[in-house]
Amino acid sequence: MFDPKSLDDIANRLANAIPPGLSNLKEDLEKSFHAILQGALGKLDLVTREEFEVQKLVLAKTRSKLEDLEKRVAEMESQVLSKEEK
């Protein structure tokens, strides 16, 4: 789901943003940040990049079919209108 290395990086950045006077708490804060981020991200309804790419291809194919159908309907409507005018 979410890359653990990215999660570690974010937690580390947050911990590094702590003022120097609290540096003795840095390791504990980094662990806390990591746990909080992991919990919050775990509650989100996320998909993997692979799942996203598959759905992107499905959507593109569906969009193409829809455009083709719209053209066919327009042609049929044109034919019906031209027959009615005769």
Image (cartoon, helix red, strand yellow):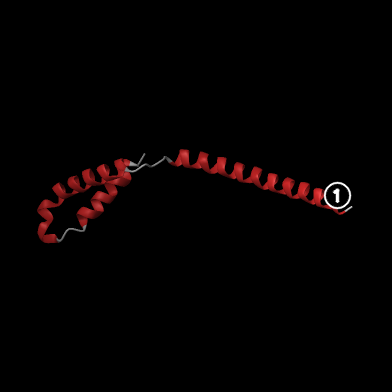
The x and y percentages for residue 57 are 56, 41
Q: Which residue is mark 1?
A: 83
Tell me what residue is drawn at x 21 percent, y 56 percent: 16
Residue 32 x/y as whole percent: 18, 46
Who's the residue at 30% across and 42% down the image? Answer: 43
Q: Amino acid at mark 1?
A: Lys
> Residue 63's x, y, as percent?
61, 46
Q: Quadrant of residue 58?
A: top right
User: Residue at left 25%, top 54%?
Assistant: 13
User: Element at badge 1?
Assistant: helix
At 27% from the left edge and 45% from the top edge, which residue is drawn?
A: 40
Q: Residue 20: name its quadrant.
A: bottom left
Give the class, few, some or many, for how many residues have Cα within 10 Å of label 1's Cα (few <14, many ≥20).
Answer: few
Is residue 65 rendered to the left or right of residue 22? right
* Quadrant, the N terminus: top left
In the depicted view, which residue is nearer to us: 80 or 67? 80
Relative side of 81 to 20, left or right: right
